[in-house]
Amino acid sequence: MNTITIEKKEYVVLAKKEYEQLLTKAASKTTPVRKRSLSEGKKLAYKLIDKWAKEK
């Protein structure tokens, strides 16, 4: 891991393998999306459609 300074900003250079390991580690920490029942999904869809319709 090396640091580079360009225009007074520091950047870190990583090997591709290390970068991929960081990505998988970060992805595993995210919470999975909760599955909804069909009726819950319909309610959410109608709610979002109404919200988008009001924006236009």
Image (tube, grey):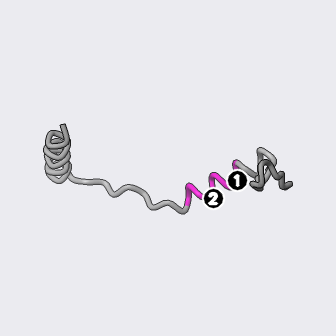
Residues 36 and 50: in front is 50
Dots 2, 1 in contact, CB < 8 A: yes
Where, quadrant-wise, is the N terminus in this rendering?
Answer: bottom right
Where, quadrant-wise, is the C terminus in this rendering?
Answer: top left
Residues 8 and 10: in front is 8
Number of numbered labels in the structure image: 2
Compared to 55, does 1 lie above or below? below
Q: Describe residue 18's horizontal placement relative to residue 25 as left or right.
A: right
Q: Position of residue 33 (x, y in %)?
A: 38, 55
Magenta run includes residue 45: no
- SS type, badge 1: helix
- Residue at figure coordinates x 15%, y 39% from the top left: 53
Q: Tell which residue pokes out farthest to the top in this image.
A: 56
Q: Position of residue 55 (x, y in %)?
A: 19, 42
Q: Position of residue 20 (x, y in %)?
A: 70, 48
- Residue at figure coordinates x 31%, y 54% from the top left: 35
Q: Position of residue 5 (x, y in %)?
A: 82, 52
Which amino acid, by three-letter code, is at mark 1? Gln
Which amino acid, by three-letter code, is at mark 2? Lys
Q: Please tell me how crowded label 1 is: few (under 14), some (14-19), or many (20+) other residues with Cα within 10 Å.
A: few
Q: Please tell me how crowded label 2 is: few (under 14), some (14-19), or many (20+) other residues with Cα within 10 Å.
A: few
Which residue is the site of mark 2? 25
Looking at the rendering, the stretch of residues picked out in magenta corresponds to 20-28
Secondary structure predominantly adopted by residues drawn in magenta: helix
Which residue is the site of mark 1? 21
Residues 46 and 5: in front is 5
Q: Which mark is residue 49?
A: none
- Residue at figure coordinates x 13%, y 44% from the top left: 50
- Residue at figure coordinates x 19%, y 50% from the top left: 44
- SS type, badge 2: helix
Query: How far apart are the two marked residues, 2 and 1, measured between alpha carbons?
Result: 6 Å
